[in-house]
Image (cartoon, rainbow, N blue to C red):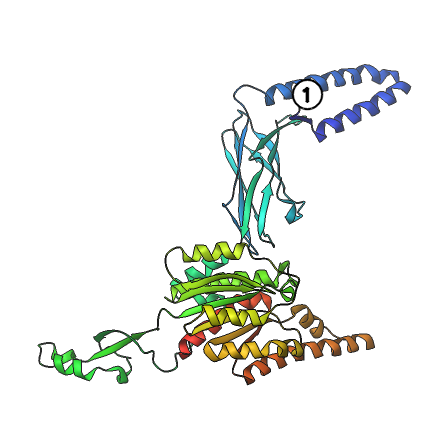
Amino acid sequence: MKSLFLSTRFFLLLTALIVGLVVAFFVPALLAPLQVLLGLLVLLTLLDVALLYAAGGGVFGRRVLGDKLANGSDNDVALYLENLYRFPIGTQTIDEIPHQFQRRDVLFRAAIKPGETSIIRYQLRPTKRGEYEFGALNVYVASPLGLVRRRFRFDEKRVVPVYPSFLQMRQYELLAIHNRLTEVGVKRIRRVGQSLEFEQIRPYVAGDDPRTINWKATARRASTPQAADALVVNHYQDERAQQVYCLIDKGRVMRMPFEGLSLLDYAINATLVVSNIALIKHDKAGLITFSHQPGALLPADRRSGHLRKLLEILYRQKTKYLETDYERLYITVKTQVRQRSLLILFTNFETLSGLHRQLPYLRRMAKDHLLLVVFFENTELRAFLDAPATSTEDVYNQTVAEKFAQEKRQIVRELNRYGIHALLTAPQNLTVNTINKYLEFKARGLI
């Protein structure tokens, strides 16, 4: 039987009997009792096999996970095991997860009473987009005797795609709807000035800005019976239908990994979240990807299904090995983005000279649009700088590392000098910091 295996307990007992038989060669009086024990072991093993293959008995198992996994997030996986035997069983469950995870800790033990169901939960965190193939769910069942195990196999060969982190997107979406974004580090930004988009006239309440009182409407209401509370104010809302484009660099500078994810994947996850927040704020979200050649282009929109299109495009993006062509990016923006928009450019500049090569194209884009250049702080370099120096070599290395860190800060100052907004951020803080910038621009009326 291919699904039947002898247990560790059986081999331990058999080994003990074999050792006893060897001893019995020198002590003949032990031979008869050992032969009885050996026969008893054989009978119990046959009885155990009969129990495991009894009619109507067995185990039902299934693996429960979503139709797709979220890249860079902890995805929940649940294993359901139902005992169909009339006696309690012990199980060992091995889930054949995709090889990309490189995990060896997916063996789970459980004791299940008759007719009950056991639920085993664990999490998987993918770090690359693409298709992941799950193998079988193997359940090894033992009766109370525990001499043999019967294997059951379920859910064989299931392919699950790994998409940009829609779990992170949903988390921020729920917080934004309930005005609780401050819980994840998004700042509460005080509005500067007044939005120009009028929404409605409403009665004055304590705390309203007196400058928003509509005196003409108040005068018209003064002759009515409600004259005592006749003051009314103009109510304004954030300007809507503004365009927000995320520009993602797919060149070689975005291949650098941090905590398993490449900079490109950090940018893709942040793009999905920021675009969704923009749609919640009634703005239009668009996407442009680029490398040494033009990439994907999704015009800014907010119609139903637009976010799904964005997700599918982001799923297919891959980094390239060549240097990015910013001239092509400028041409794409010039020809395809006609309305003044917020351009959030995700890229990475390591040196000031690297910035100067692309600065002319950035300055041209900044003339027609509000440009935010987002690039990454080397967190491993920062950890090295914060460590105490214990030798002359450490001092020398930290001096060199500080030069690179200083150059990153100089890039920010250089961009600001030409009126280009810049954001230097650690990869793990990319999403929060980018949302903060977007909300700041909205509050200041810059878009």
In terms of depth relative to the viewer, which is nearer, 205 or 68?
68
Name which residue lies at 59% across and 66% down: 427
Where is residue 48, by image quadrant?
top right
> Residue visible at 79% across and 78% down?
396
- Disc count in the image? 1
In which quadrant is the C terminus drawn? bottom left
Q: Quadrant of residue 219?
A: bottom left
Query: Which residue lies under the disc numbered 1?
Result: 45
The three-letter amino acid code for the residue at tag 1 is: Thr
Residue at the right extreme, as displayed: 26
Residue 236 appears left or right of 107: left
Residue at (58, 60) in percent of width and height = 265
Question: Residue 282 versus residue 94: which sits nearer the camera?
Answer: 282
Asked if residue 391 can be seen in this view, the reply is: no
Element marked by disc 1? helix
Task: Return the x and y of residue 349 as percentages of the image width and height.
Answer: 63, 73
Query: In the picture, which quadrant includes the N terminus?
Result: top right
- Label 1 CA crowd tier, 10 Å (few <14, some 14–19, many 20+): some
What is the x, y in percent for residue 309? 45, 55
